[in-house]
Image (cartoon, rainbow, N blue to C red):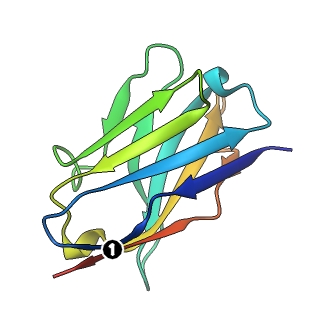
Amino acid sequence: QVQLVESGGGLVQAGGSLRLSCAASGLTFGSYAMGWYRQAPGKEREFVARISWGISITTYANSVKGRFTISRDNAKNMVYLQMNSLKSEDTAVYYCAAQKFGRDEYEYWGQGIQVTVSS
């Protein structure tokens, strides 16, 4: 059974930092690209960042580029999202997701974790 479990969310002041973690189990982690998505109240879920399998190519939404960094530790089956210079508009539920090599869609999703940035 595949599980993705996010941690590290919470309340932070604008300009502050948080690091989200996602622990993956039940899958061959190195064969999956990993992504972070977020959903703010009343809005559609949106892409935040992605890190590929293999050589760990990273991509970011324009809204977080230069402030957020995605990374992975294949030995620990972990993916991270370092979030710096947080803004109130970063407030959302953040989701970790796994995309198997060769698939177009993310196959597995975590339960989500709340990040609240106070201005």
Name the residue at 59% across, 47% down.
Answer: 97
Query: Where the C terminus falls, by quadrant?
Result: bottom left
The residue depicted at 44 percent of the width and 42 percent of the height is 80
Residue occupying the point 13% across, 65% down? 15
The residue lying at 50 percent from left, 38 percent from top is: 79
Q: Vertical placement of 51 versus 67: above or below?
A: above
Count the marks. 1
Q: Quadrant of residue 87?
A: bottom left
Q: Is residue 105 visible?
A: no
Instruction: Label 1, secondary structure: give it.
Output: loop
Picture coordinates of residue 73 (x, y %)?
Answer: 50, 26
Identify the amino acid type marked 1.
Thr
Determine whether, in the image, residue 4 is placed left or right of residue 34: right
Residue 23 falls left or right of residue 92: right
Say which of 53 and 106 sits in front.
53
Q: In the rendered view, does 87 fall on the left or right side of 34? A: left
Q: Nearer the viewer, residue 17 or 109?
A: 17
How dense is the environment of label 1, judged by Cα within 10 Å: few (below 14), some, or many (20 and up)?
many
Location of the N terminus (image quadrant):
top right
Q: In the image, residue 77 lies at what x, y percent?
A: 62, 31
Q: Residue 86 location in percent, x, y?
A: 20, 63
The residue pinned by badge 1 equals 91
